[in-house]
Amino acid sequence: QVQLVESGGGSVQAGGSLRLSCAASRLSDSVYWMGWFRQGPGKEREGVAAIYSGGGIPYVADSVNGRFTISQGAAKNTVYLEMNSLRPEDTAMYYCAADRDLRPWVRSSPENIGSWGQGTQVTVSS
């Protein structure tokens, strides 16, 4: 079974930056999408960003485009989410996810995601 372990997160003031990391193990597929969803208080879980292990242009949601950057490590099993110019509305639990398909991120359909991390809290104060 795939294991996803997140690190990073925390509390920051508006305008600040944070970096999240996610390391995957026991991946059975050689190629896959890996990235982040988030769920704010009283909100549904939404796709934030994803990157393909085989390369190419990452997916970044419109709500964070230009502020968040997703990248992967040299070993391809670790992804990073660099979050800049954070806003109070970015406050959420951030979950690492992995799947063969990009569509769950684009459609914000987390029910179709194959593997999840435990989540890490990001809190942005005004």
Image (cartoon, helix red, strand yellow):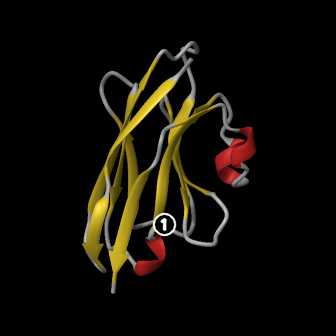
**Residue at x 63% of width, y 58% of height:** 45
In this rendered view, identify the residue nearer to me: 85 or 88.
88
Few, some or many C-alpha atoms within 10 Å of disc 1 (few <14, some 14-19, many ≥20)?
Answer: some
Quadrant where the C terminus sits is bottom left
The kind of residue on which mark 1 rests is Val
* Rendering coords of residue 94 (x, y %): 47, 54
Q: How many marks?
A: 1
**Residue at x 31% of width, y 31% of height:** 73
Q: Is residue 54 above or below residue 90?
A: above
74 sits to left or right of 99 = left
Can you tell which quarter of the image residue 100 is in?
top right
* Rendering coords of residue 71 (x, y %): 37, 42
Furthest-bottom residue in this view: 126
Can you tell which quarter of the image residue 87 is in?
bottom left
* Rendering coords of residue 96 (x, y %): 49, 42
Quadrant where the N terminus sits is top right
* Rendering coords of residue 67 (x, y %): 39, 67
Q: Is residue 90 above or below residue 24?
A: below
Q: Is residue 21 above or below residue 63?
A: above
Q: Is residue 57 visible?
A: no
Q: In what element is the residue under mark 1?
A: loop
Q: Is residue 3 above or below residue 97?
A: above
In this rendered view, identify the residue nearer to me: 78 or 11.
11
36 sits to left or right of 86 = right
Tag 1 residue: 64
Q: Is residue 122 visible?
A: yes
Can you tell which quarter of the image residue 102 is in?
top right
**Residue at x 58% of width, y 15% of height:** 29
95 sits to left or right of 82 = right
**Residue at x 28% of width, y 60% of height:** 18
